Image (cartoon, rainbow, N blue to C red):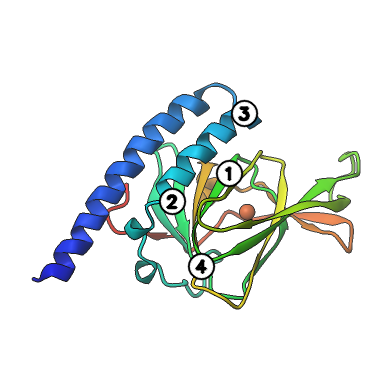
Amino acid sequence: MGTTQDTAGDIVTERMQLVREMLARVRKVAEAQIRRDSLDAIKAELVALAARRELFPIDEFPPIEGGNASMYRLSEDADHRYALYIVAPAPGQFAPPHDHSTWAVIAGVHGRENNKLYKRTDDGTQPGVALIEPSGELDIVPGTAIALMPDDIHSIHLGADGPHANLHLYGMSVEHCPERRMYSRSKGTYKIFPAATGVQKARGAD
Ligand SMILES: [Fe+2]
């Protein structure tokens, strides 16, 4: 009853309308084989959506205990492609170097998320072995985004500041990506890590 509820409902309605319109354009871009230049177009789409920060009020997405991601699903196709999340980890969290086995685009909405990028320096022929070296870093803040090809490797570092929330768009749902690799730079190894669990559904999600 009140204005607060009405406003919250309006936010969800407008948010989902923009999400659906954006994903319709993204599907067209990604229909052909995904390449870095197509990811750039998708990145621009996600940055534009993320700029509507008022549609992603931080209070709606508290960090999730348990599970492994603090992820809220906004949309996902029936075949699990084109999965869009708002990810809201607690301050201080850290995700070790990993790939996604699918393309990924991350755009800043709230806070500052430091991403480090790595390049692989071995030839990839030995199972379980991977040598990685830092190749760059980027702070994801409102107005910035990062695009990652399926084999690209990044790690995520959150400061004590916060709250944090970013939009993540993946070619395939992280609940249906069982072949992602997590790397240990110090050991020179990688492990396959399981599909994500504990993802919650955002209000109004498709
Ligand atoms: Fe990631």
- Which numbered disc, 1 or 2, marks the residue that appears first in the sequence? 2
- Which numbered disc, 4 or 3, marks the residue that appears first in the sequence? 3
In the image, residue 135 above or below residue 24: below
> Pointer 3: residues within 10 angstroms few (<14), some, or many (20+)?
few
The reply to whether residue 38 is in sight is yes
Write down the residue under mark 4.
164
Secondary structure of the residue carrying tag 2 is helix
In the figure, is residue 48 to the left or right of 133?
left
The amino acid type of the residue labelled 4 equals: His
Q: Quadrant of residue 191?
A: bottom right
Write down the residue under mark 1.
104
Write down the residue under mark 2.
50
The amino acid type of the residue labelled 1 equals: Ala
For marks 4 and 2, give the CA distance.
13 Å
For marks 4 and 1, give the CA distance.
18 Å
Secondary structure of the residue carrying tag 3 is helix
x and y percentages locating residue 58 in the rendered image: 39, 68
x and y percentages locating residue 202 in the rendered image: 35, 58
x and y percentages locating residue 86 in the rendered image: 45, 57
> Pointer 2: residues within 10 angstroms few (<14), some, or many (20+)?
many
Which tag is nearer the camera, tag 1 or tag 2? 2
The amino acid type of the residue labelled 2 equals: Ala
Label ID, residue 37: 3
Identify the residue at image location x=49%, y=26%.
29
